[in-house]
Amino acid sequence: MAQFKTTGPSRQRSQKKGWLLRLYVAGETARSVRTLRNLKRICQEYVSVPFTIEVIDLLKNPRLAVLNQIVALPTLIGEGPDGPPLRLIGDLSDTEKVLTGLRLRP
């Protein structure tokens, strides 16, 4: 899977006001494709600030797994407009858990 970048909703990412979401996967598997689709849907429906999604294929760059302490796949590491970075593991199919994990729901 190639490095994939997308931005939304304004097509520009503000370093201070937007989300940087890095999705770590191992190849273009059905699970990684489903996870990316779930993440895009959630961002388009619920994220009101600019966001950037980067897909990082650890088969192509395995040292990033060690550098970023990735122990399970798929893993999403998000850096939001406020608060510390967050981690979510899995295919992101449970929308409510993802929204809570992204601090978009209490």
Image (tube, rainbow, N blue to C red):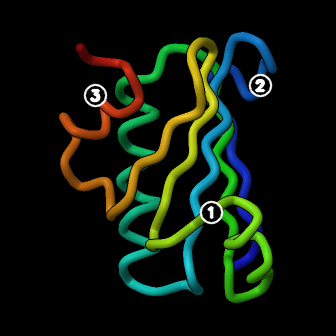
32 lies left or right of 4: left
First reached walking from the N terminus: tag 2 or tag 3: 2
Going 69% across and 88% down the picture, which residue do you hit? Answer: 59
Mark 3 to mark 1 CA distance (whole Å)? 22 Å
Mark 1 Cα-neighbour bin, 10 Å: few <14, some 14–19, many ≥20: few
Which residue is under mark 2?
A: 13
First reached walking from the N terminus: tag 3 or tag 1: 1
Indicate the position of residue 74 as horizontal and vertical percent values.
45, 68
Going 36% across and 28% down the picture, which residue do you hit? Answer: 45
Q: Amino acid at mark 3?
A: Thr
Indicate the position of residue 70 as horizontal and vertical percent values.
57, 66
Name which quarter of the figure residue 103 lies in.
top left
Position of the N terminus, as image quadrant, is bottom right
Which residue is under mark 1?
A: 69
Q: Amino acid at mark 2?
A: Arg
Task: Please state which of the two labelled residues, at mark 2 or mark 3, is closer to the viewer.
Answer: 3
Under circle 3, the secondary element is helix
User: Which one is in front, 67 or 106?
Assistant: 67
Mark 2 to mark 3 CA distance (whole Å)? 22 Å
The numbered dot on residue 100 is 3
Going 50% across and 71% down the picture, which residue do you hit? Answer: 71
Q: Amino acid at mark 1?
A: Gln
Mark 3 Cα-neighbour bin, 10 Å: few <14, some 14–19, many ≥20: few
Task: Please state which of the two labelled residues, at mark 2 or mark 1, is closer to the viewer.
Answer: 1
Look at the picture and state if 33 lies above or below 92.
below
Position of the C terminus, as image quadrant, is top left
5 lies left or right of 94: right
Look at the picture and state if 23 lies above or below 78.
below
